[in-house]
Image (spheres, rainbow, N blue to C red):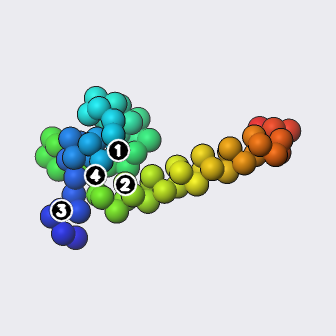
Amino acid sequence: MKPAELMTIKDASQYLGIKPPTLYKYVKAKVIPAFKIGNMWRIKRSVLEDWLERKVRQSETEALERETGQGYLFK
């Protein structure tokens, strides 16, 4: 793993376009995968990109279900 692969909360929040306190909230709630080194949170860039891609696919699937009217019977 390259050192640039590890992102700080500040780096990751800038990458995602959200404020650091919002990212802290997601990390603490285990919505976004992260880990601590000492007392500092770190996020692996590749893990964050994979998580983001899954969220995009999930949103696209939900939008398609809304458009086609499918998926509401069993939710």
Instruction: Name the image quarter holding the C terminus.
Output: top right
Mark 1 closeness class: few <14, some 14–19, many ≥20 residues within 10 Å: some
The residues bearing labels 3 and 1 have C-alpha atoms spaced at a distance of 16 Å
Tag 2 residue: 48
Work out whether mark 1 precedes mark 2 in sequence or the reverse, and give the earlier one. 1
Q: Position of residue 31 (x, y in %)?
A: 44, 41
The residues bearing labels 1 and 4 have C-alpha atoms spaced at a distance of 12 Å
Q: Give the quarter of the image for residue 69.
A: top right
Q: Give the quarter of the image for residue 25.
A: top left
Mark 2 closeness class: few <14, some 14–19, many ≥20 residues within 10 Å: some
Residue at 39% over, 58% down: 49
The residues bearing labels 1 and 2 have C-alpha atoms spaced at a distance of 9 Å
Look at discs 3 and 1 and give the one toward the viewer.
Answer: 1
Kindly indicate whether the residue at mark 2 contacts the one at mark 4 (C-beta within 8 angstroms).
Answer: yes
Kindly indicate whether the residue at mark 2 contacts the one at mark 1 (C-beta within 8 angstroms).
Answer: yes
The residues bearing labels 4 and 2 have C-alpha atoms spaced at a distance of 7 Å
Mark 3 closeness class: few <14, some 14–19, many ≥20 residues within 10 Å: few
Mark 1 element type: helix
Which amino acid, mark 2? Leu
Look at discs 4 and 3 and give the one toward the viewer.
Answer: 3
Residue at 40% over, 45% down: 32
Tag 3 residue: 4
